[in-house]
Structure formats: C-alpha cells, structure tokens
Amino acid sequence: MVAKTKKLFGNDEGRKLIARVLRENGRRYMPRYALAFGLMAVVSGLTGASAWIIKNIVNDVFISQNSALIWGIAAGVLVIYSGRGIADYAQTTVMNAISRDIVADHQNRIYRHLLAQDMRFFNTASIGELVMYFSNGAHAVANLMHLLITSLGRDLLSLISLTAVMVAMDPILSMIAFLVAPGALWGITSIRRRIRNIGRQEHAGMAIIIGRLKDSMIGIRVVKSFGLEQRMGDEMTGNVNVTAQRMMKINNLSARSGPIMETLVGVALGLTILYAGFGVAEGSRDAGSLLAFLTALLFTYAPAKNLARLTLNLETTLVGVGVMYKFLDRTPLYLDKPDAKPLIVGTGEIEIDGVSFTYGEASNALNDISVRFPAGKVSALVGGSGAGKSTIFALIERFYDPQSGRILIDGQNILDVTAQSLRSNIALVNQDSFLFEGSVEDNIRAGMADATEDQVVAAAKAANAHEFIVEHPEGYKRSVGEGGANLSGGQRQRVTIARAMLRDAPILLLDEATSALDAVSEARVRDALDRLMKGRTTIVIAHRLATVRKADIIHVMDNGRLVESGTHGELMKLSGTYAHLSSLQFTAEAEEEPQKKKRKAKLTTVGE
C-alpha cells in the first residue's frame, strides 16, 4: 500500500521536483497559504455539516413533523451554505493572488538568469524553448502549488469531513463504500504513466512551433522573396497538428478518470443501497441516517475525483517545472572570481598576450596571438572572413575566456576584474545597429540609464542624429519599431553611435560600423564616428580597407594569426597580405566605378 501511495505522487524525479517547489516557495508564502488553508478547512467542515443536517431534515421535519425545529434547521441550512460560499470565495481570491505572485517571481528569476548566461548558451539556445521556460515553466510552478494546496486543503479535508460523517452514521456501510478505493488508485496510476511521456513530447512540440513563428517574423522578407509561404505554412500545419494530437491524447487520457470514478461510485452506492435498504424496509435503520449517509457518499465524489486526477494533473505540470529547473540550474561558463575587483582604467591600453581560443571542438579561432592596442589611438583589425577579428572583440568584452594567454587592460588581467566593471568601460558600435523596441530616447539612454534629457540630446547631436529625430512629430519619443524597423539603416547607426557617445567609455570597439550604408549615410556616420573616437582607445574592424587607412596602426590577421602590423604606408611597402588585399579591393572598386557612372547616367536621362 505504501508503494502504491508513492506511485500516486509520481516517480522519484517527480517527487524531487515537488519537494523543491515546496522548499523554494512554501516558506515565502506560508502566511497566505495558512490563511487559504484555514478557509478551506471551513469549507470542508461546512460540507460535512451540510450532509449531516440531512438526517435532521428527514427525521425531524418530514417524518416526525416537529414544527418546533423547522425554523432552527432552516436557519442552520442558511448558515452552512452561505458560510461555505463566503469562505470558498475568500480562499479562491487568496490562492489567485499567490499564484499571480509566484508566476511573476519566477518569470523575473528566469529572465535574470537568462541575462547572466554566457554567449555559448545564446549561440545554441532555441527561442521556442526560452519562451516555454518563461511562460509554461513559471505558470507550471504556480499550478503545482495550487494543485497541492487545493487538493490537501479543500479536497482532502472535505473527504475527511465527509468520511467522518459517514463513519458516524454507519461504520459498516463506510467500510463497504471504501472497498472501491484500491480500484481507483490502480486505474489512475496506469493512465499517469502514459500522460508523462506524451506531456514531454507535447512540450517539445510547442517549443518547435514558437521557434518557427519567431523565424517567420524575423525572416519575413526572405520568406516572401523566395515564395516560401506555402512551404512554411505546410510545415507549421504539420507541427501544429502533431502537437494538437498529443494534447488531445493527454486530455482523453485525463478524461478516462471520469468513467472510472463514476463506475466505482455507482458500485459503492449500489452496495450501500443493497445492504442498508433492507434494514430501512425492516425498520432496523432510520431513513434520515441512510439518506444523510448517501448524501455524504455522493458529496465525496467531487473531492475524490479531484484527488484521483491530481496525479494526472501533476504529470503534465511537472513537465513544465522540470524543463524550467533544468534551465535555472545551468551555471554560466564564465563567472567572476570570488576575489574579482573593479577594473580601473587609466590610459586604456589593451594588450593581448599569447592568446589561443577555440569555439567548442572547432579548429582554433585564435592561435597564440599577441598584439597591443595603444592607449588613445585608433587600431584597425583587417583580414578575410574567419581570420579571428570578431573573436578578439568577444574576448576583450569577456563573452568568452581564452584557453590560454592573457588579455590586459592597463596591466590588469580581465579575468581578475568584474565583468560589469569591464563592460562599463567599453562602448560597442557594430554593423547590426541593433535597437530595442521602444522610443529613440530609450535606445540612446541605454548607454547611461540615469542620463538627463540634455545629455541625451547632446549625444544625439554629436552623432548627427538630432536633426532627423526632431523632424518627426514625436521627436525623441518616436517608436523605433521592432529591431529599429521604423528607421533607415543610417538613422539606426547614428542612434547606436549616440548611445555610445552617451556611455562615454574610454575604450571603443567598432565592428564594420559603416559597411551597409550608402555614400551619404556613410559620410554622416563617419563624421560622427570621428568625434566619438577622439581621445579613446579605439579598435576598428573593417573589410573595406579605405576606411582604416588613417588608423594609427593596422593589424592584419589570417586564419587566427597576426601576420602583419604597421601603418597603411608601411604595410603597402611590405607587399604582403595587406597589400594583396588592398590591390584586390582597388581592382574591384575600379571595375565597379564605370558601372556606377552608367547607372547614374541612365537615371539622369530618365529624370530629364
């Protein structure tokens, strides 16, 4: 019997999850849970009283016709049912408030844990899975607590109260009625195993659907350009149908507990009527007691059914709880050392000393590279795709840690300082020019949350962004749209430069900041960047070598190694990798120039 009772509450993994949820949430919400539990006890006690009073109604009112008790019994019925309704409403509102707070607490916890993850996680994580953690996982914890407290406080107490009434009325009849309990336990346990497996598959299917929806939203231009609507629609239909079938299986399996319980209650009622009915007919039992017993037995159906389905509901709920905790238990790869100190930036010199790094099991992205970026100067990183330029940026910002070697800022190893202090001294402007959904002002203020309005405007002016911002009726309150969709490429780039201006960090990283802009936009952005770079330690990544000719020093990379360093003139004299790349770009630009002139001439003719 003990083994069957343990099975009722799931396998070992399920019991551990339940224990963890209770441990992490029970103490915090204990006062409110105690209040709700007390109100449930009131409801349960009054439920038992509502069955008990049937005996008085039948024997004293209908059979004995004792008129002196009619008013008292009627008042008692009113008190019982009105008190039960008020207590039930009160406990429901308390439980709803607790569930709301649990969901909010866990969503905040999930989001903060997400932000703390390392870049390796974000390179492999699925948006669909993250949404499932945030939505289903947080709600699953609240649902689990609600199920446990409600089942113990309302259903179990009601069952105990009604059982006490039944035993008080007739112990022998009670034993007959309880003979069906083992059958109910066996039937529910067999259903629970199937629900657990299907529930995991259904959860994974929903993550796929959400991920596909995300891809469709972000890549809608590609979808429409390549005519993928039908193909992606068919794929989504397949995923939705499979997930819907799994959900239907879970619902159908859960529904099977209904006929099982109905049949067993019918058996209990039939046995009770057979045994006690003859006693009433022979006069050895009073009708009021039998009717009260039957009423209590019928009242046990609802809480017994809820308790029987508890294990089924727990199985589907524990799936969401399990995947959420799997995420919350993930420890970021790169954490601050216990004795990490804030970074103190003086001149801002950066030195990379014998650094090697690899992404997972791939070949080395950097091979024993050593390079110095002088303070207050503009250094450029050039080289073909995959040379390791962006990897250097990622290591400087400590998105990853090198397998060997050191990265020093003013002589301080960045592994010995806090990540927050490191990144607060670095401003990044990249080619993606990502903007958060919100206003222009919000995006600029991301550089410094407590900036004044005057500081925001000053940064926008320095970034050549103020003019186009105030031309719009909403000005700085204008919504940039998702990912900055309401702005042009040049406008988005100037907003990100304003963000970096406002940050006023001593170290500046520029990653292909003008690569996707037209000539007019590039000129405005270049002018803003010149102001931004002044007096800062600046590292520039550029494929277009014309944009870095004025750099104080140019470092040429190839296949994760530093192959050349020097000014533009010095590197051209070497006739090495840089000179070769420069000649290739010069030839390509020379061939492209006549085509540009032809297109311009055609446009002029049309315009005339």
Image (cartoon, rainbow, N blue to C red):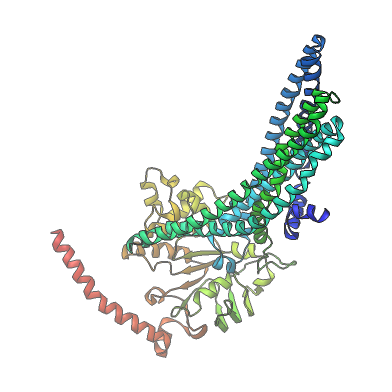
Residue 167 sits above or below residue 188 on the image = above
Q: Position of residue 273 (x, y in %)?
A: 76, 32
Q: Position of residue 298 (x, y in %)?
A: 73, 33
Q: Which of 310 and 469 lies nearest the eye of the viewer?
A: 310
Residue 218 sits above or below residue 584 on the image = above
Q: Which of 314 and 460 lies nearest the eye of the viewer?
A: 314
Q: Is residue 498 visible?
A: no
Q: Report the quarter where the C terminus lies.
A: bottom left
Residue displayed at 77% across by 48% down: 182
Residue displayed at 53% across by 47% down: 452
**Left or right placement of residue 247 versus residue 196 in this view:** left
Q: Is residue 237 visible?
A: yes
Q: Position of residue 112 (x, y in %)?
A: 63, 55
Q: Position of residue 164 (x, y in %)?
A: 84, 34
Kindly indicate the quadrant of the structure image that contains residue 75. top right
Q: Which of 172 and 513 lies nearest the eye of the viewer?
A: 172
Count the numbered circles shown.
Answer: 0
Residue 445 sits above or below residue 330 on the image = above
Kindly indicate the quadrant of the structure image that contains residue 336. bottom right
